[in-house]
Image (cartoon, helix red, strand yellow):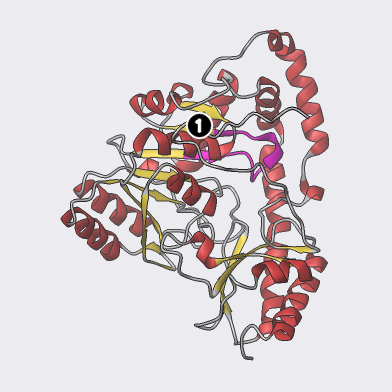
């Protein structure tokens, strides 16, 4: 057998070892935010494909506009104007392969190694990992039920500047925050904008859960409260149609889009997907979101009830007005990180709090997703979760 070629001296200096990995599922999967397969609008999407192809299917013979399908961008702009009070046009945005790509190219455009990036004290691990990949020094800001605590935000920025650090931007998920579940109040949003404005820091708003409201009053976007171009906005169709369609969008000043776009690879998004979503948006998307949210509130209520029945007052948890997550706090000293893999092997999956923390703290918290399993599976799974924790003596009860 020939000697195998060695690539060790050829890899670029900024490459790291990574693996595509695989998707693992436990019997009771409360880890990843999948939608319920039974709520996917498959028939409507089939009709949308047919309609879109009849309208301009032959255009698939050409590469689409680099910014993404103009018709879909126009429809997104109209939706943002109507529902998020944003004054934007199709020319103010680009389509991306899910919101993850939009977030990734903005991070690369704004972040140099060693820059301070402000995040909520617990924040979506996918974004946190991307920030770390590009050398950001992620610093968490304390939060309460209304969102980011303004005094802590101001204090942290002042402290970091006093250390000679360059604070680049604040990344926030203000609606049904991942993983904590709260929605930032309007007053807090105004205060956060005031503080970041005073310090000359942009706000990076990840609004991918905004449509998943099933109780409480809607709160307008950060973007709508700003008239200076200081808010960068990303959204997604993953949570309201299907993650597998991989479609998101970035709204930002043209100079930001131009810099971010230099990091995009692979050209424009799939025109096949864009045509399908555009046609779906013209007809049935509002009805679908309403039906989906009716399903989600039943699942949230089932999980909340099951937590009460199986854990009582030994743990506490949030009751979000929307989104996909319940944030559970176990007694101080409980280590849900160390046992996470063992409990997965026992049949229940979750993410522990330290995975969402810029500082690595919070191992006594877990994020539970209620979007994917049926109601009865949620009840069974939470009961099994409690039994496993008791059997393993993870914390005293």
Q: In this orientation, which residue lies closer to the viewer: 157 or 181?
A: 157
Residue at 40 percent across and 48 percent down: it is 171
Looking at the rendered image, the quarter that the C terminus falls into is bottom right
Q: Position of residue 364 (x, y in %)?
A: 54, 75
Residue 60 in the figure: left or right of residue 227 = right
Q: Is residue 395 visible?
A: yes
Total marks placed: 1
Give the residue pinned by disc 1. Answer: 9
Q: In this orientation, which residue lies closer to the viewer: 160 or 19?
A: 19
Mark 1 burial class by Cα count in 10 Å: few <14, some 14-19, many 20+: few
**Residue 98 is covered by the magenta coloring:** no
Q: Residue furthest bottom?
A: 397
Residue at 65 percent across and 69 percent down: it is 340
Q: In this orientation, which residue lies closer to the viewer: 57 or 396?
A: 396
Q: Is residue 302 visible?
A: no
Q: Quadrant of residue 310?
A: bottom right
- Where is 89 relative to 315, above or below? above
Residue 49 in the figure: left or right of residue 14 = right
Residue at 68 percent across and 31 percent down: it is 4
Determine the secondary structure under disc 1. loop
- Where is 219 relative to 386, above or below? above
Residue at 19 percent across and 53 percent down: it is 161
In magenta, the rendered stretch is: 234-248
Q: Position of residue 362 (x, y in %)?
A: 49, 71
Q: Position of residue 148 (x, y in %)?
A: 37, 61
**Residue 238 is covered by the magenta coloring:** yes
Q: Position of residue 325 (x, y in %)?
A: 61, 61
Looking at the rendered image, the quarter that the N terminus falls into is top right
Q: In this orientation, which residue lies closer to the viewer: 26 or 323?
A: 26
């Amino acid at each position: 057998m020939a000697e195998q070629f060695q690539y060790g001296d050829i890899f670029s200096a900024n490459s790291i070892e990574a693996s595509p990995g695989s998707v693992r599922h436990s019997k009771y999967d409360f880890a990843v935010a999948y939608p319920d397969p039974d709520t996917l609008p498959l028939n409507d999407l089939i009709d949308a494909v047919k309609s879109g192809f009849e309208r301009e299917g032959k255009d698939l013979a050409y590469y689409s506009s680099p910014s993404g399908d103009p018709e879909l961008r126009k429809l997104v702009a109209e939706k943002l104007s109507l529902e998020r009070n944003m004054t934007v046009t199709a020319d103010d945005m680009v389509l991306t392969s899910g919101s993850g790509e939009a977030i990734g190219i903005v991070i690369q455009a704004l972040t140099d190694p060693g820059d301070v990036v402000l995040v909520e004290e617990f924040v979506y691990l996918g974004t946190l990992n991307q920030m770390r990949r590009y050398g950001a020094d992620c610093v968490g800001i304390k939060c309460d039920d209304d969102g980011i605590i303004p005094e802590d935000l101001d204090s942290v920025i002042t402290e970091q500047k006093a250390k000679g650090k360059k604070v680049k931007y604040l990344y926030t998920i203000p609606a049904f925050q991942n993983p904590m579940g709260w929605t930032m109040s309007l007053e807090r949003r105004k205060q956060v904008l005031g503080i970041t404005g005073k310090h000359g820091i942009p706000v990076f708003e990840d609004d991918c859960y905004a449509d998943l409201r099933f109780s409480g009053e809607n709160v307008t976007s950060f973007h709508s409260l700003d008239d200076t171009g200081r808010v960068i906005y990303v959204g997604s169709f993953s949570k309201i149609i299907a993650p597998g369609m991989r479609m998101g969008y970035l709204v930002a000043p043209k100079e930001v889009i131009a810099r971010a776009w230099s990091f995009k690879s692979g050209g424009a998004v799939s025109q096949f997907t864009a045509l399908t979503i555009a046609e779906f948006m013209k007809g049935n998307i509002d009805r679908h979101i309403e039906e989906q949210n009716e399903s989600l509130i039943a699942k949230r209520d089932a999980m909340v009830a099951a937590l009460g029945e199986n854990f009582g007052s030994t743990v506490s948890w949030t009751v979000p007005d929307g989104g996909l997550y319940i944030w559970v706090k176990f007694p101080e000293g409980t280590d849900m990180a160390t046992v996470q893999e063992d409990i997965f092997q026992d049949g229940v999956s979750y993410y522990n709090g330290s995975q969402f923390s810029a500082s690595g703290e919070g191992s006594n918290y877990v994020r539970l997703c209620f979007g994917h399993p049926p109601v009865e599976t949620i009840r069974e799974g939470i009961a099994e979760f409690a039994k496993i924790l008791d059997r393993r003596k993870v914390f005293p009860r």
